[in-house]
Structures are given as C-alpha cells and as structure tokens.
Image (cartoon, rainbow, N blue to C red):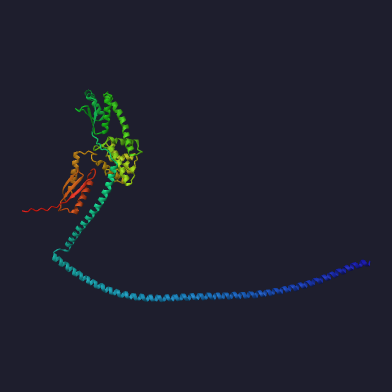
C-alpha cells in the first residue's frame, strides 16, 4: 500500500523536479540567447557606424574629386576663352591695319583718278588738235592732188579688190591643181585597175540580118505565087524582106532585133522544112515565138550566172533576157549591162563597198530599155517602176534613177554605176554615132564656150573630147583664164549630155609686132 502511494509521489516529484530543471535550463538558455542577441545587435550597430563612416569618407573623396575635375575644366575653359579673346584681338588688329591700308589705297586711287582725268583732258585736247591738223592736211592734199577723199577711197578699195582677187585666184588655182593631181591619180588608178581586170569584145549590132539560101530557086519559093509568101512573112513578123541580086542570100531589115531574130529563125526553119506557104509560115512563127521566150529566159539566166547573182524573179529574168535584143547606138544592151555590172563590182571592191549589190545595180541600171517600146515613158522611169515592182534594194532603185542624172545619187554605189555606165559607153568603138549628132555636139560645145565674156575663138577637137578656147589677152588675165575654164566646165556640165569627159584648154597669148621701114 505504501509502495503504491510512494510511486505516484515519486513520479510527481520527478515531474516537478524535471519541470523545474527544464524551466531553469530554459531560463539559462534564454539569458544566453539574449546576451548573444545583444552582442549581435551591438556588433551590428558597430558595423553600421563603421559603414556610415566609410560612406562619409567616400562621399568626401568623391566630392573632392568632382571639385578637382570641375576646377580643372574651368581652368581649361578659361584658357580657351583667353586664347579666343587673344585671336579676336589679333583679328581686330589686323582688320584695323587692313582698313588703314584700304584708306591709303583709296586716297592713292583718288589721286590717280584725278591725274587720269587731267591726262584724258590733255589727250582730248591733243586729239582735237591732231584732227584739226589732219583736216588741214587732207584739204591741202585734196587741193594739191585735185582728188577728193571719196575718190581716193574708191581708188584704194579698187586696188585692194584687184590685189585680193589676184591672191584668191592664185590660191584657188594652187588648191585646184593639188586636188586635180590627187583626184586624177586616184581615179585613174581605180578605173585602169577595173578595166584591166575586165575585158570584153565589142560587137555592134546592126539593123539587118542576112539569111543564106541553098540555091537561087529558093528565092522564088520564098516570094511565092504573086508574092503571097513574102507578104505573109512580113505581115506576121513585122520585118522587111529584101530580095535583091545578092546571090543565095535574103536580107531581113528591122530596127527591132527581137523581131528580126524571130523572122530569121522562122525563115531558116521554112528553108529546112521546104514547105513554104502561108499556113506553114504561121505555124512555124507561133512555134518560134514560144521557143524564143524560153531562149530569152536562158539569156537572163546566163547573164546572172556569169555575174554570180541569185534570187531573181522568173519574170525579171525574162525582162533581163530581152535586153539581148535591144541596142543603144548599136551597142547590145545586155552585153552593155553585163559590162557595167562587172565594172561596178570591181570599182566597189576597190572602194570597200558591197560588191554583190553594186553588180546587181549595174546589171539592172538599163532594165527599162527591155520594154521601153511597150510602155510610155523613159527607160529610167520604166526601170525604176520595174525595180520597185520586184522589190529591189533602195540602192539599186536609186542607181537606176540617177545613172543619167535624172535624180540625185544617194549612195556611193549609185555613183559607181554612173561611172561604169560612162566607161562602157565611151570605150572606143562601143557605140555608133551619126554624123549629124556628132556635128551637133561639136557645135554645142563651141557655142557654150563662145558665150563666155572675153572668149575670142573656140575649137572642138579630138572628136569633141577636147575644147580649146582662145581668149582676148587685153580682157582676160592669166589668173582669170582659170575662172573662164571653170565657167565653161560648169556650163557644159549643166547644159549638155555627153559620154566620157571633155578636156577644156584656155589659151591666152599676147603678141607685140613692129615693122621696121
């Protein structure tokens, strides 16, 4: 029982003692913690005070540094201001010096101006005196020479004009001689070179064709009963048959080479066939006409093949072939065109122009002659229309239009074709010329020169290729003789048409004669 009471009491006492001990230990721990906290607080206060002191020191140092930098900047600004002030003062001093110098110069100029005014006044006075003296001298000269001022002026101007005319004429003559030497040399080289590279036989076409007969009996068969065969041949061919005393020959006469050729082939076919009557004549004539058309095309093809030209319309080839049966002053038109084409190509090659285009222009330059008897207009106009119809190059068209001077040449090739045409036509023996036309041309040459003032006599020589002009020596001087030659040249070029060139020679001769008695 006692033990049961003792245990609780011991437990209570243990609890009380444990609580008391726990309380004591807690108080001791709290006291220690308070002290530690107080110590930490004191330490924190010390750190804060130290930080405040350090911050104050840093602020003081920073303020001192800023103060020093500011003072330095102020010193620099003061230095710069002082330098600027010094420069301004220096500039002001310079301006003052310059102003003083300008004032001195102005005063000097004023003095000079006064002196110049005085000098000018003196010069005016002297000039007035000189004019008076000059006037007196002129009056004295006019009185002594008995020539007025105006007349003397006219005499001097006339003398100056004569002198200048002489100098100008000499200059022109020298330049002309130089140009002629160069131009003649170059032209001669080009033309001779081209003519050496191309050579063709000259054959003049006539207006008659002779057909050989196997025997004299054939003449009667050609004439037929009461002349019906010969009348039929002449009617359908348009050619005159001349049957005369010439043995075994019949002459066909016509100005149209194509008709004459058709009549020749028809007549030869009739002679070979042996059946000569109107019906057979008409049949053979129709057949020959068809064959001749093909032959004409072949002539055109041969011409273009010889020249190396292509791209021709078949109709244009036929027109080119017709040129074979056309003549100009007895010269075959197709051969002339081929020759002009060759020469144009050679000249174009020498000058660096388009050779093919020059050949084409040369071949077609007289294309209008192929049908000029069928269409109204000159062969130039017809040729231009043909070229436009078949869409030829504008250079070819202009070459056709300008080769006789009817239109201005617009290209070098046009001029080349004109030169080649003149070369071909003017070759010795290339063309026939009637006596009447020959005499007429010579008369026109002489008349053109005789109309020039100062010309006494004129002689056309060398078949009209040279004109010798005798001038009056008392009216024409040596230098003016060149002007006369130029005037005659320009007049001939503007009023006459002629093949080749004409050389003009002006002769001035002064003779002094006395007779001793």
Say which quarter of the image contains residue 27.
Answer: bottom right
Q: Is residue 47 above or below residue 318?
A: below
Between 16 and 144, the one lying in front of the other is: 144
Does the image show residue 14? yes
Q: Is residue 207 above or below residue 361?
A: above
Between 207 and 181, the one lying in front of the other is: 181
The picture places residue 238, in percent across and down from the top left corner, at 25, 30
The picture places residue 449, in percent across and down from the top left corner, at 18, 47
The picture places residue 197, in percent across and down from the top left corner, at 29, 42
Say which quarter of the image contains residue 260.
Answer: top left
Residue at 26%, 51% (x, y): give it.
Answer: 179
Q: Is residue 366 above or below residue 218?
A: below
Question: On the picture, is 364 further left or further right than 225?
Answer: right
The picture places residue 51, in percent across and down from the top left corner, at 66, 74
Q: Is residue 261 above or below residue 471?
A: above
Residue at 35%, 37% (x, y): give it.
Answer: 313
Question: On the picture, is 265 further left or further right than 463?
Answer: right
């Amino acid at each position: 029982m006692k033990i049961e009471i003792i245990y609780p009491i011991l437990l209570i006492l243990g609890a009380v003692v444990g609580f008391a001990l726990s309380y004591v230990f807690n108080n001791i721990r709290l006291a220690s913690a308070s002290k530690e906290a107080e110590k930490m607080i004191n330490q924190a206060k010390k750190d804060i005070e130290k930080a405040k002191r350090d911050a104050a020191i840093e602020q003081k140092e920073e303020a001192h540094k800023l103060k020093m930098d500011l003072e330095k900047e102020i010193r620099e600004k003061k230095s710069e201001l002082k330098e600027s002030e010094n420069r301004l003062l220096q500039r002001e001093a310079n301006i003052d010096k310059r102003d003083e110098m300008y004032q001195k110069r102005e005063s000097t100029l004023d003095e000079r101006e006064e002196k110049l005014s005085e000098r000018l006044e003196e010069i005016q006075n002297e000039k007035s005196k000189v004019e008076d003296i000059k006037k007196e001298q002129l009056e004295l000269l006019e009185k002594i020479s008995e020539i007025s001022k105006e007349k003397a002026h006219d005499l001097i101007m006339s003398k100056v004009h004569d002198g200048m005319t002489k100098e100008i004429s000499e200059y022109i003559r020298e330049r002309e001689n130089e140009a002629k030497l160069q131009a003649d040399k170059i032209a001669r080289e080009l033309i001779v070179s081209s003519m050496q590279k191309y050579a063709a036989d000259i054959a003049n076409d006539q207006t008659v064709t002779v057909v050989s007969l196997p025997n004299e009996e054939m003449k009667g068969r050609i004439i037929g009963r009461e002349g019906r065969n010969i009348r039929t041949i002449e009617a359908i061919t348009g050619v005159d048959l001349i049957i005369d005393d010439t043995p075994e020959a019949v002459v066909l006469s016509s100005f149209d080479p194509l008709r004459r050729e058709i009549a020749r082939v028809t007549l030869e076919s009739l002679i070979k066939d042996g059946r000569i009557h109107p019906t057979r004549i008409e049949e053979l004539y129709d057949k020959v006409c068809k064959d001749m058309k093909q032959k004409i095309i072949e002539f055109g093809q041969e011409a273009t093949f010889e020249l190396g030209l292509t791209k021709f319309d078949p109709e244009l080839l036929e027109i080119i072939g017709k040129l074979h049966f056309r003549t100009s002053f007895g010269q075959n038109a197709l051969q002339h065109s081929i020759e002009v084409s060759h020469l144009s190509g050679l000249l174009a090659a020498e000058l660096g122009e388009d050779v093919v285009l020059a050949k084409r222009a040369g071949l077609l330059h007289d294309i209008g002659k192929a049908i000029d008897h069928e269409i109204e207009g000159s062969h130039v106009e017809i040729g231009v229309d043909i070229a436009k119809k078949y869409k030829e190059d504008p250079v070819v068209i202009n070459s056709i239009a300008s080769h006789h001077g009817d239109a201005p040449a617009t290209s070098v090739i046009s001029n080349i074709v004109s030169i080649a045409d003149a070369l071909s036509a003017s070759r010795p023996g290339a063309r026939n010329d009637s006596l009447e036309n020959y005499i007429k041309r010579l008369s026109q040459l002489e008349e053109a020169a005789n109309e020039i003032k100062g010309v006494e006599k004129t002689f056309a020589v060398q078949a009209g290729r040279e004109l010798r002009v005798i001038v009056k020596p008392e009216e024409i001087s040596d230098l003016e003789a060149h002007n006369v030659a130029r005037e005659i040249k320009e007049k001939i070029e503007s009023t006459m048409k002629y093949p080749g060139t004409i050389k003009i020679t002006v002769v001035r001769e002064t003779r002094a004669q006395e007779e001793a008695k």
